[in-house]
């Protein structure tokens, strides 16, 4: 009977070992075969979008109807290209004529070469962007060897629907890829050490159990005790697995933090309450970014926390786990409020690369007890969560770059199309007003010709700042293209939108050397995105016709 029980327990241990081994294989595979390629693709797409914006800016320097030839390039064109190379990690810029001849290149050896490749004449000449990721020491589309990782992008220049030439821009993505590789490798090491540690412990315990299967009652009692230990260890392994699986499925920051809190406060292993939160460390300040079970009074008291304040601030300052068995008796628990009930705390620092990025605080019954092994596990979970947070931040930074204009910091047209469709849907469903302001800088080309494109760029950025100061937080400002801006005003009728437009016009006139013309349109039943923008654009054109530096409202 004792042998059968021992064999059953040994079989159970083998199953635990297989589950643990599966976790070791599955989690890193998911991490490297899904997460890493996804972020790499996003980096490449961002570089391609940036190349298109740069080419569009350079094309704006050319005469409207001119073809791309050596003699049609402005005198300061090489200077502008050199400036952009320094600002935007550009390795090389080429300009092709309509026939595919290189009429300008930052590498003189390229001059005069003619691109006869199929992709150029079948894709680029027809007005389509063409891009390729070229790794270090690999060949480019034109057969050249690169010394860094680049995204090679062809951007056609179209005038009146006709192909006038093209830009070829090589964007250096080596730095971003190195940062990604470093972050991924460190994340993998932290995850691997944690899981392998528990896997080793399970393996050792399994071996011991196998050696005592045929023992007497004393041996059976020993196996029983070991089985109980293994059960607890398996619960710890399952906890790590659940957290790892949860954070690997989320890349959006808000979703990630919510999943982390709900997963950890749901563990019976730690006997924690369904209550807690996560602070981010931002310089000497701490910001509560996610929480469960708190009152408005609690949230108000923790708005202006500094590193070193209360138990959470202490964990952020030292980088060590802070344990408080009873908040009512702990002098370190400095933030209190009426009717607070006695409770215990575990505060876990979220550390990555010896840097505390935040803290996770949990609630436990007063007078709780916790072993060293569980504390080590919590510390390991903290490192894993910190790594996931850094990955989410990298994703958000990359996403922001792809949806915003790099010169002004305003949203680009891609993000505008998403937001305006949402606003139109709200107006159609609830009958709320919605208005659009379209504005354009008067005589901007003359300003550029007089003061140079560098001053023109500064003017665009300055006007973007004036717009942001003049509108509400709920409004949405966009760099629409060139010197045109668009402002989306949800919940605003035509009269209020006209007042806002006048306020912006006056502010620009007072704070800059130029004036602007503005057109206003408001949503009416049945309007599409194209309708409301088109009417604002028509009103802007009317303002230009009537002498500029004025606001016109669409009456259609």
Image (spheres, rainbow, N blue to C red):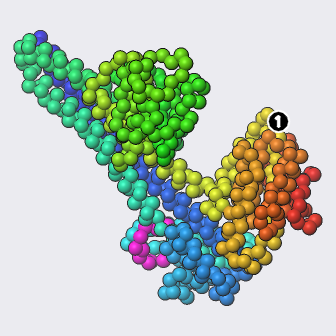
Q: Which residue is mark 1?
A: 431
Report the residue at 72% width, 49% height from top: 476
Q: Quadrant of residue 349?
A: top left
From the viewer's perspective, is residue 232 above or below residue 492?
above
Residue 148 visible? The answer is yes
* Residue at 61% across, 66% down: 52
The image quarter containing residue 119 is bottom right
Q: Residue at x 82, y 47 (%)?
A: 435
- Classify mark 1: residues with Cα within 10 Å, few (<14), some (14-19) or many (20+): some
Check residue 370 for magenta coloring: no
Local SS, label 1? loop
Q: Is residue 524 above or below residue 73?
A: above
Residue 527 falls left or right of residue 74: right
Residue 98, given in percent of the width and then of the height, sits at 65, 80
| Residue 177 in the image, given as x and y percentages of width and height | 42, 60
Q: Quadrant of the N terminus?
A: top left
Magenta span covers which residues? 142-152
Left or right, residue 402 beside residue 474: left
Q: Reply above or below: 544 against 491.
A: below
Please indicate, yes or no, whether residue 280 appears anywhere in the rendered image: no
Residue 520 is situated, as x and y percent measured from the top left of the image, at 85, 53
């Amino acid at each position: 009977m004792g042998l059968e029980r021992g064999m059953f327990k040994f079989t159970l241990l083998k199953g635990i070992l297989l589950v643990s081994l599966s976790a070791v294989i599955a989690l890193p595979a998911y991490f490297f075969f899904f997460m890493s390629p996804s972020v790499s693709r996003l980096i490449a797409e961002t570089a391609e979008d940036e190349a298109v914006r740069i080419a569009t800016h350079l094309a704006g320097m050319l005469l409207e109807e001119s073809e791309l030839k050596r003699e049609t390039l402005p005198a300061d064109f090489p200077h502008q290209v050199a400036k952009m190379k320094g600002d935007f990690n550009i390795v090389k810029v080429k300009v092709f004529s309509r026939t595919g001849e290189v009429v300008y290149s930052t590498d003189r050896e390229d001059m005069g070469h003619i691109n006869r490749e199929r992709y150029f004449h079948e894709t680029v000449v027809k007005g389509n962007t063409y891009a390729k990721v070229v790794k270090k020491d690999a060949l480019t589309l034109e057969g050249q060897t690169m010394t860094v990782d680049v995204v090679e992008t062809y951007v056609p220049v179209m005038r009146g629907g006709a192909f006038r030439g093209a830009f070829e821009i090589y964007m250096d993505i080596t730095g971003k890829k190195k940062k990604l590789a470093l972050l991924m490798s460190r994340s993998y090491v932290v995850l691997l050490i944690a899981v392998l540690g528990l896997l080793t412990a399970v393996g050792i315990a399994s071996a011991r159990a196998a050696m005592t299967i045929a023992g007497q009652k004393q041996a059976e009692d020993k196996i029983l005790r070991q089985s109980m230990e293994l059960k607890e260890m398996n619960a710890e392994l399952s906890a790590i697995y659940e957290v790892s699986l949860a954070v690997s499925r989320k890349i959006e920051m808000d979703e990630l933090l919510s999943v982390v809190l709900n997963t950890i406060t749901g563990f019976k292993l730690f006997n924690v309450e369904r209550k807690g939160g996560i602070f981010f460390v931002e310089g000497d300040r701490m910001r509560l970014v996610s929480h469960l079970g708190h009152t408005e009074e609690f949230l108000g008291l923790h708005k202006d926390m500094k590193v070193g304040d209360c138990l959470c601030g202490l964990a952020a300052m030292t980088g060590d786990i802070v344990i408080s068995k009873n908040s009512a008796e702990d002098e370190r628990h400095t933030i209190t409020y009426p009717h607070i009930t006695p409770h215990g705390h575990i505060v876990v620092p979220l550390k990555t690369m010896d840097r505390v990025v935040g803290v996770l605080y949990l609630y436990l019954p007063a007078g709780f007890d916790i072993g060293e092994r569980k504390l080590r596990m919590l510390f390991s979970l903290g490192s894993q969560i910190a790594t996931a947070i850094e990955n989410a931040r990298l994703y958000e930074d990359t996403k922001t770059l792809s949806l915003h204009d790099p010169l002004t910091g305003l949203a680009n047209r891609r993000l505008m199309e998403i937001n305006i469709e949402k606003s139109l849907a709200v107006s159609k469903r609830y009958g709320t007003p919605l208005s659009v302001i379209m504005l354009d800088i008067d005589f901007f080309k003359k300003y550029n010709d007089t003061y140079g494109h560098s001053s023109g760029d500064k003017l665009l950025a300055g006007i973007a700042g004036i717009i942001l100061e003049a509108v509400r937080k709920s409004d949405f400002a966009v760099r629409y293209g060139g010197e045109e801006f668009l402002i989306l005003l949800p919940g605003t009728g035509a009269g209020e939108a006209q007042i806002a437009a006048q306020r912006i016009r006056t502010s620009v006139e007072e704070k800059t050397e130029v004036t602007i013309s503005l057109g206003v349109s408001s949503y009416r039943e049945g309007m599409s995105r194209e309708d409301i923008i088109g009417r604002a654009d028509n009103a802007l054109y009317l303002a230009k016709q009537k002498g500029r530096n004025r606001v016109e409202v669409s009456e259609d």
